[in-house]
Image (cartoon, rainbow, N blue to C red):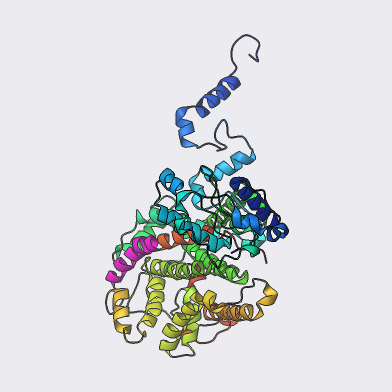
Amino acid sequence: MADGNGRTSLKEAVSGLGDHLRGSQVWTSIFRPGSPMRADGGDSPRNRAYVVMNNVLYHLHPVKVKRHGVKLSYTLCLGGLSFFLFILLTITGIFLMFYYRPTSPQAYFDIQALATDVAFGQLVRNMHRWGAHVMVLTVFLHMSRVFYHGAYKPPREFNWVVGIILLVLTLLLSFTGYLLPWDQLALWAVTVGTNMGGYAPVFGGQVSFALIGGVQITADTLLRWYTLHVLFLPFIITIFMAVHFWRVRKDGGISGPL
Amino acid sequence: MAELPEHLQKRAAEARAKATGVPAAAPASAAAAPAVAAGGPGRDLDAESSRYGVPKSLLERAMYARARKDGVAVPVLVGAGVASGQAPAAAPAAGAATPAASGPPPGVRTQRLLTVVKAGAIQGTTKEPADKVNVWPHLLAIEFVALLAMLAFLTLLSAFVDAPLLEFANFNEQPNPSKAPWYFLGLQELLAYFDPMVAGILIPTFGMIALAVVPYVDRNPSTRPTDRKLAITIFTVFFVGAAVLTIFGSFFRGPGFNFTFPWRDGIFFDDLLTILE
């Protein structure tokens, strides 16, 4: 009506369409009550609670947290960043799986082809590699942060143990991925790393044999570590992460201020 | 039995008096009126037995038991049932604090106060007021910004620095030095000092076990840094030790894993190869 000639303006038509869409059954079935995406999702204390409660997010976060817990200086977001890096590594890793064959010598040439033949291939591989290094760092720093806050004390003892398991799994994930480019760096870094396993008392030989699938690293090791890297270890770590996050909430949320 | 508050005792006495039809007697006057206690309203056990359908012998036994328990005299029996009404010798009527505690008149129900549960015992959920904020938007906004910052950092780093890729794996040509991934370089550094069994197996294994049992060994309940000097000291030594060993193995080890100064001989650290060059 704004133009005064009885016709609806484009702006009004668009906003009317938006209102219609946000009121539709499809839209309201996707966004649960309280969501800011809904027509009735205005900002109110009730809706702020609903945003979390009526959301899959409720598995990770309570409706409210202690005020000191949201201070950046308390957690430095290290746990959350570790989780985000895991997601990022999963996404970039799936991308890389499309172009990678865990056999010799194809593995090496596939990595080379990422830089030359695949759109954004080199970028994604770089993100995967640097992200993995950063994740080892954030997980370790997260553990240190938790220690200095005494956040492993009752009732959080067991969640600390789960955290240590997650640290070991993170290292294993990184280490198994290290071999996959199948270049000199990968081969000999893994050789040095796995040689240590051979010194384990009593079962040293067997451990080493099971680890690299033979008496020395071969293309068989490549397949073995690939399977560990893309399937087995992510599966295990996901289970432990679920327990870890669940226990954070069940053990009383973020630990108290110092 | 729990101590009964005085007002409840008083209320119970009044209720009992109302039920039995005898005015509530103050404890002081009860001793002065044993006659009332001894007398009370008479009972006709035959009539009660036929009315309630309870055998007379049971009513009789209950009557004596109640009298013995409450310490009052047995009510006078009326009617035909007086035959067995020998007075119990042990009834200390004079000491009774209550008026005649005979059975209630027919049709009157009475209740006994068994115990008093203090309100605090059941509903004592004192919730300490906590200073809390909504996760949405406060925490989620921070997390989202942290996520974006990390994503931006990694994207920029990846756009400008490629991940290292050396020549094709060659089993016959070991590079010198050969280094493990950087997070194992602390252990590889230890290999220079200890037997492989110690540096490669025992130290990492016991290190991880020691970390895992920290909450069960550290019994100190306080989380204040001033109360945890020992724990913090030990962990800091571990932390700094791991960092120093890793940095040392990364930057100060050259060909043959021999000691080197990175500023003199260059850096032999392939993980950061592409960043450093």
Q: Report the residue at 34% width, 65% height from top.
A: A228
Which image quarter: residue A156? Answer: bottom right
| Residue B116 visible to the viewer | no
Quarter of the image where the C terminus of chain B is located: bottom right
Going by the image, does A185 lie left or right of A23?
A: left
Question: Looking at the image, which residue sits at the far right?
Answer: B28
Residue B204 at what x, y percent from top left? 46, 80
Would residue A230 be counted in the magenta stretch? yes
**Whole-percent x, y for residue B200 in the image:** 43, 83
Chief secondary structure of the magenta span?
helix
Q: Is residue A212 magenta?
A: no
Residue B257, percent from left and from top? 48, 85
The residue lying toward the viewer, choosing from B6 and B105, is B105
Say whether residue A209 is left or right of residue B240: left
- In this image, B99 relative to B108: left or right? right
- Quadrant, the N terminus of chain B: bottom right
At horizontal 69% and vertical 61% (from top left) the residue drawn is: B31
Q: Is residue B71 above or below residue B188?
A: above
Q: Is residue A225 above or below residue B98?
A: below
Instruction: Identify whether B198 is placed above or below B7.
Output: below
Segment colored magenta = A218-236
Residue B33 in sight from this viewpoint: yes
The x and y percentages for residue A57 are 51, 48
Q: Residue at x 42, y 56 (%)?
A: B58
